[in-house]
Amino acid sequence: MVESYTFETNDGVKLSTRLFKPREEKDIKEGSLVVVLVHLYSIHGVCQGLLRGIAAGLADRGYKALIFDMRGVKRSTGRTSLTGFA
């Protein structure tokens, strides 16, 4: 199961995210954390879609997995940066 969300950062940037979850609540590993997957090279246009297969595989194994587009990529607002300090 996949749910889409938009999170707003302290400086007003909106990040587009997807949360992958096991199909059944009973399948979620007890006490497990959410695994956050981060894509590389946002300045070159790489997006969360690159991590979709990994997130789905984690969900199939009982974990929640969150992927998101970095600032300025696809549906996330803001400016892209190589260093994160722009």
Image: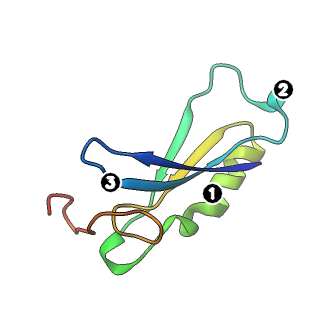
User: Whole-percent x and y of residue 36?
Assistant: 49, 45
Q: Residue at x 52, y 64 (%)?
A: 48
For marks 3 and 2, give the CA distance.
35 Å
On screen, residue 37 above or below 28: below
In the image, residue 33 sits, relative to residue 49, either above or below, namely: above
State the CA–CA distance, disc 1 to disc 3: 26 Å
Mark 3: amino acid: Val
Q: Which mark is nearer the camera, 3 or 2?
A: 3
Image height of 24 relative to 2, above or below = above
Q: Which residue matches tag 2?
A: 26
Point out which mark residue 43 bears: none
Q: Identify the amino acid type marked 1.
A: Ile
- The residue at which mark 3 appears reads as 13
Earlier-in-chain disc, 1 versus 2: 2
* Residue closest to the eye, 11 or 23: 11
User: With 26 as the anchor, is 10 left or right in this view?
Assistant: left
Residue 2, given in percent of the width and then of the height, sits at: 71, 51
Q: Quadrant of residue 63?
A: top right
**Which residue sits at x=66%, y=62%?**
53
Residue receiving disc 1: 54
In this view, 80 is above or below 61 = below
Rate crowding at label 1 as few (under 14), some (14 to 19) or many (20 or more) other CA atoms within 10 Å.
Answer: some
